[in-house]
Every structure is written in C-alpha cells, then in structure tokens.
Amino acid sequence: MYRKEKTEKLKNNIKYLIKSRGETRLSLCNSSGLTRTTIYNILEGRVVNVQQSTIRKISDFFGVSYKEIETVDFEEKETIESSVSLHGNMNPAAVPIIRESLLIQNLDKRIGELAVSHPLTYYFGSASNLIGVLLESKVSGVNESGDLLIVRKGVSSGSGEKLVYDKTTNKLSVISGSYFDSDVVSIIGDVVEERFNGC
C-alpha cells in the first residue's frame, strides 16, 4: 500500500510539474532520456514500482528533490509558498545562464531543458520563464562584456526595457517602448535585473 501511495504522489507531481513549468511529456522524454512508454505508463497508473534511476532522472529534469518527488505534494507546497509575503522567506528561482553567442540557437528551448544544459544563477522574486544572458560584447552603451541580464523570455505588452536581437547587425540591444518592427528586431524578453560584470 505504501508503495502505491508513493507512485500515486509521483504521478500527480509529474503532471503538476509538466504543467507548471511549461513543459510537455515529449520534452520530459527527450531531455531526461526516458522513453515515452515509461512516462506514459507512470502517468496512466500502470506501474506500481518505479525504478529509482527513473525517479532520479525525472527529479533532475525538473530540478526538484529526489526524495520529495514521491512524498511531497508539490502543487500544495508551491501554492503555500507563493501566498507567503514577498518580503518573507522566499525560495530563489534557478535561472539558466546562456552566453550571448549561443542565445539565438537556444531561444526556442524550454527553461527546464536549458536548466539541465547550462550553468545556473538564482533570482529572488516572482519568477517564471527567466533566462540569464551573459554578455560577450557591449550593449547599448550601458552594459559591458561580462554583465548578466536576467530576462523574462517572450513578448510582453509592458513598456519597460527589453532585450532585442537586431536581425540586420546580428547584435543585441536594450530598448524601451512597446512598438517594434518585427522585420528588423526579434524580442528576446523583458529585462528584470542587471548584474554588472557577472556580480
């Protein structure tokens, strides 16, 4: 009975983590090295004893504790943590760091996939879909090589500073405003934090 409860908890946590992290069953399979059959059997409740190596691959992919994934309800835990005051004790978000020269080729990858293949930094604050861009050249006369920009990936309607890729010069720049010529620039995302010289 105890084993069945653990497997049920594992199944529910995988479903929640896939949804909350913006992943898919396919991205989990591709990045963890597990077969689709293995993941589907767990999620459909066809397996009672999941191998420890499988559990470790799943927990590593999501960046969560190997022990907790079978025993803790992550949805409940994260709901409680997100309702705590921002000024209180908040867990930092892991943010994959991508070098400027590798940014464009990695832009379409999911955060979970990037977190496994790139070094990490941490961001304290409300966070989702964040990447760190390690600059290798000057940007907009403000940022130097070695600076790290924490960027919320994707297009937003806000008018704050945005990191964009100029298709004509193949260079990054930081610009403000909400109107962009999509033929000239690709929006990487909103700049949420700057760290000078990798600090």
Image (cartoon, helix red, strand yellow):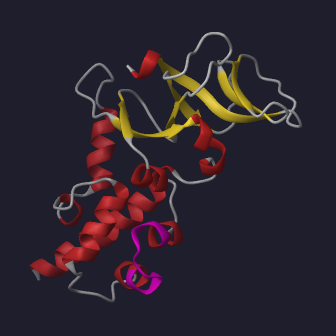
Number of numbered discs visible in the structure rendering: 0
Residue 33: quarter of image? bottom left
Quick one: quadrant of the N terminus?
bottom left
Residue occupying image coordinates x 66% and y 44% = 104
Residue occupying image coordinates x 54% and y 21% = 145
Position of 3 relative to 118 (above/below): below
As drawn, is 32 to the left or to the right of 73?
Answer: right
Dominant SS of magenta comes to helix
Residue occupying image coordinates x 76% and y 34% = 170
Quick one: quadrant of the C terminus?
top left
Position of 12 relative to 184 (above/below): below
Within the magenta stretch, is there residue 37? yes
Residue 79: quarter of image? top left
As drawn, is 87 to the left or to the right of 118?
Answer: left
Front residue of 192 and 106: 106
Residue occupying image coordinates x 33% and y 67% = 58
